[in-house]
Image (tube, rainbow, N blue to C red):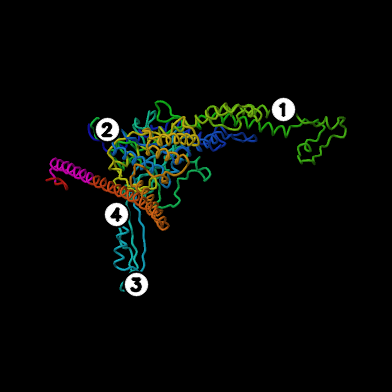
Amino acid sequence: MEKMTDGELAALLSTAVEQATEYNGEYSKDNEKYLNAYYANKTGDFAGEEGRSQVVSTDVFDVVEADMVSHSRTFLGQGEVVSFMSHTSNKKEEEEAREKTDYVDWVVRGQPNSYQTNLAWMKDAEIHKTGVVKYYIDEQKEVDEKEFKNVSIEEVIEIQESLVGADVDRVKVEVSEQEETSEQTFDIKFRITRIEKKTVIVNVPPELFLITRNAASKDAAELVGDKIQKTRGELLAEGYDKELINSLPALGQDIDGQSQLGSIRNQDQGGVDYTETINNWASQQVELKDLYVKVDYDGDGIAERRHILMSGNVVLVNDYFNHVPYAMMSAIPMPHKAIGRSRAEVVYETQRQKTALLRGMNDNIYATNNPQKVAHPDVDLDDLMTRRLGETVVRMDDDTNIMPGQAVFPLAIPYTGDKNLQVLQYADQARAQSTGTLMASQGLDADALTKETATRFNGVKEEGQGKIEAIARNFAETGWRSLYEGVAWLVSRYQDTETEIKVIGKPLTVKPTSWKYSQSVESKVGLGSGNKEEQLEARQAFYAVQKQLHAEGSRLVDESKLYTNLEGMKIGAGLSRSEALFNNPEEPAELLKRENELLNQVVLQLQEQNAQLQNPLAGAELVKREGEVAIAQGKLELGVAELQEEKRQFNEKLLQEKDSKDQDTAVELTKLELENDKDIKGALV
């Protein structure tokens, strides 16, 4: 088999995209239906009749927003969502697992826009059949200018060095303007260009997500991707040829069959408008398809995963990439399906039923309050049809022989509102049972509620919480787990720059490409754990038992276990993980600092006592206390010496490992040099 041409690849992928889920079946229509229900739009099943009640029940909105309160607390609070676990008791592997957990969590939840991104991701999964985020490494170029006045030549050099800092490879500092103010000083302006690789996580709207129909999972799908928009100016800045960019179709030129989700979402701002706000070439939008497909491109008979970026039939990027950088989750996963069901889908029929009941009840009230009238032929109909509250005069023929009460009387309309309310209560009960969302209208009036036992009410409450916790568990084990694993995979291969973050009040410098262990991932969100108040109470009870065992000298508890529990209580109380409230017993420097503080306190007390002591007995006591201080100082010096020795051994071992690694690298480079018959820098020969 021969290698594919770009034209053959584009034709193959165009067909695959047309057969993807977004373009087929009821997937897009269902998502539009559920979003309309969330907004309570009067369309589709909720389109009203002219002259009749137009009210729409808001069950989808109520359930989704009730869930989001719990999800925000669970996933966007201070507690861990996912952690990496070491496979062995190897100390280095355990340290790497902790570092990986801290750094990936910072990437996922600690960025400036993380809250909005993660909240939108979960809400998409609540309303639509699936919620999707995409993650990738973006090389960002930031340009800044700083101006300094009246500086000397020596100061200029110092300023330039300080602006570059330690990032010599990533920061470029150059003088953009310079003006001599005197023989000794300058006014100078520097342009600082910083190039940095960052991990970016973005939401993928459901109408832009592409996946092979009937795929069991994202990794099993032959095609996964999304549609993105970029301006022609952005493509030019990324290095693409201008003539090539001109050949790409503009966004919105072919909108037949496209999803209406964007228009529904932006209905309050006029829907989706494909015309540019600034109408020039650089601002013109181009639609691209960012695809990760399994295809036998090289003709070896084996399909491999490749990253393809294309617009129309033009292929812009075609690289091997053995990963699908998307995280998907559904509120209700379905067996053997990548796309599950949403909460809106479950509640939709209840909202449709309640809308019909509410409209019927309103129409009945309107008819009851404004009944039709039965009139004798002798009544002047023009007068009868003229409605002026309290002022209507209805005339009758002069020769009529009937009384006014017999000439005009209301046509009685039976009131059915009480019957409708009973059905509405049943619908609310059924919805609460299926979704776990407890509402005030569960069919229990105030008197009945007082007769409920506390045990039964708590059972109903726990059952409702359990259903919502099940949704949270589904999110954690599918979407969040996939995102953490995917980000760890991505940064360990492509982020070769160091990043400094702050964990538990201390800086942590991370270089992901140095990670070498493969850790398993454990979800921290589970069923049966109760709410935070219950968890905090349980931890406090365990802490009391731990303290008692520790005081008794039991081997079951040490300071590390106490510290772990205290950190858990801190998170349970809603405090930030970065707040360092307790000294970590596994960090000798922290304990040594505390011992030094205690020693200083003892010395100060002795100095105060020495000033007061005047008799021989007091002097003897002073000698005794000075001896205690000397012993404490000896222990302190011993601790410092031990720390210095540990540091020396660590540095020596690190140097040995570096030499060994450099030697291995040189050997590998020598092999490549011999295989390719080319000189390679760093080889042995």
The residue indicated by pointer 2 is 296
Circles 3 and 2: CB distance less than 8 Å? no
Mark 2 or 1: in front is 1
Was residue 663 drawn as part of the magenta stretch in this picture? yes
The answer, for residue 614, to whether it is visible in the render is yes
Circle 2 sits in a helix, a strand or a loop, which is it? loop
Task: Report the residue at 50% width, 40% height from top.
Answer: 264
The answer, for residue 22, to whether it is visible in the render is no
Going by the picture, which residue comes out furthest to the left?
Answer: 685
Mark 3 or 2: in front is 3
Q: Which residues are magenta?
A: 652-678
Circles 4 and 2: CB distance less than 8 Å? no
Which residue type carries mark 1?
A: Pro
Q: Nearer the viewer, residue 11 or 69?
A: 69
Circle 3 sits in a helix, a strand or a loop, which is it? loop
Q: How far across and down, in percent of the image, does residue 47 sit?
A: 58, 34
The residue indicated by pointer 3 is 181
Circle 1 sits in a helix, a strand or a loop, which is it? loop
> Which mark is first along the chain, 3 or 4?
4
Between the C-alphas of marks 4 and 3, the distance is 31 Å
> Which mark is first along the chain, 2 or 3?
3
> Which mark is first along the chain, 2 or 4?
4
Between the C-alphas of marks 2 and 1, the distance is 72 Å
> Which mark is first along the chain, 4 or 1?
4
The residue indicated by pointer 1 is 414
Q: Quadrant of residue 84?
A: top left
The residue indicated by pointer 4 is 166
Which residue type carries mark 2?
A: Asp
Position of 377 with respect to 22 (left or right) is right
Which residue type carries mark 4?
A: Ala
